[in-house]
Image (spheres, grey):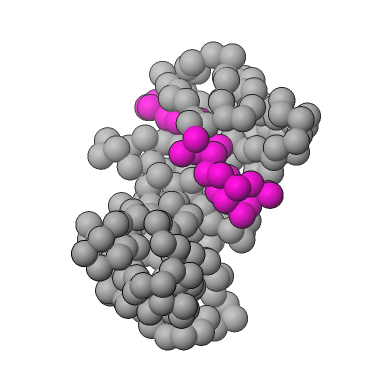
Amino acid sequence: MPSRNFRRSARGLFALGVVAGLVVGCSGGGSARRTVAIVATRDACSPARIVVKAGERVAFEIKNESSGDREFEGIEGTKIEETLVPAGRTRTINYTVPESEQSLKVKCYVPGGPTTLIEIVVSGSVTDEGGRRPFKTTKSPNATVNVHLDSFVVKPDVTSAPAGPIKFIATNDHGTHVHEIAVLRIRDDGSLQNAGEIEDIDPRRSGDVVLDLPKGKYRLACLIVPGEAGSTVDHYQSGMHVDFEVR
C-alpha cells in the first residue's frame, strides 16, 4: 500500500493508536522523515488518500494555494491537532504513524465551508524492509489471477480464488498511462488494509506478486493519484477498482 515516496494508500483507509512526536511548524521535520505533500486549493485538498507504514515518521507539508484560510486536523480518533494554514502559506505537521492498524482519517477544510476527507492507508511496517512481510510470500502459488488494467478499469479473469498463496499477474493494456494494482483487504469495519501491490506498471507491460491471503473480501485497485506517474486524476476515485473474494 509501497516503497514509493508519494503516498498513498488508501489509494481508502487506515491505522491508528498512540501518536508520537507531533510538531507544528513552518518547515519539514528531521531528515529521517518522509515528506507527504498536501495542497489546498479553492475547492478541495489533494491527494484524497495517502499510504504510510506502521511506525513510519512522516511530515505532512500542507500548502495553501487558495485565497482564504484552511484548517487540517485528525478525525474519528486520529490524534492530529487542528492546525490553521493561512492563505498562501505552508505548514508542516510531523507525525509518527502508530504501530496498531486502526482507522486513520484527517480532514482539510475551509472553516465553516467545504471539507475534504483524506484517508490514510497503512501498508506493512517500517520493519518490513528487513524482509518480513505480512502477506508477500515466496511460497509456490496454488492459484493464479490474471488482471488487466486500463483507464479506468480493473478486469481480473476470475472473481475469487482459494485462500493461501495466490499469484497476481497484472498487465497494463493502456498505451500511454502508467497503472498499478493493489490488493486491499476489506476489514469487518469496512476499512482497507493494503496486503500487497505491483507498482508503476508501464504501458503495455506486466508485473506479478505472490500473496499469502486468508479468506475474506478484498478489493483490487489502482491507487495512483494526481502528480504521480504523470497522472492528473485519482485513478481510484475514477472507478479503477473491483471487489474480489478469497474463499
In percent of width and height, residue 92 lies at 45, 78
In this rendered view, identify the residue nearer to me: 214 or 64: 64
By secondary structure, the bulk of the magenta-drawn segment is best described as loop
The relative height of residue 236 versus residue 101 in the rendered view (above or below) is above
Q: In the rendered image of this protein, does residue 153 appear above or below residue 138?
A: above
- Residue 32 in sight: yes
Instruction: Tell me: residue 246, above or below residue 127.
Output: above
Is-magenta flag for residue 145?
Answer: no
Q: In which quarter of the image is residue 6?
A: bottom right
Whether residue 241 sits left or right of residue 199 in the image: it is left
Which residue appears farthest toward the top when viewing the image? 158
Question: Residue at the spot x=57%, y=20% of the render?
Answer: 155
Q: Nearer the viewer, residue 243 or 208?
A: 243
**224 is within the stretch colored magenta:** yes
Q: How many marks?
A: 0
For the point 63% across and 52% down, the residue is 228
Q: Nearer the viewer, residue 90 or 79?
A: 90
Which percent across, then down, holds residue 129? 61, 58
| Picture coordinates of residue 122, whole percent (x, y) | 44, 53
Give whichever of 5, 210 is nearer the camera: 5
- Residue at position x 71%, y 29% in the image: 174
171 w.r.t. 107: above or below = above
Location of the C terminus by quadrant is top left
Q: What stretch is highlighted in magenta?
A: 212-238
Question: What's the residue at 32%, 77% (across, down)?
Answer: 84
Q: In which quarter of the image is residue 165?
A: top right
Q: Position of residue 8 (x, y in %)?
A: 51, 53
| Horizontal side, residue 152 vs residue 123: left or right | right
Look at the image and tell me whether residue 132 can be seen: no
Instruction: Give residue 100's quadrant in the image.
Output: bottom left
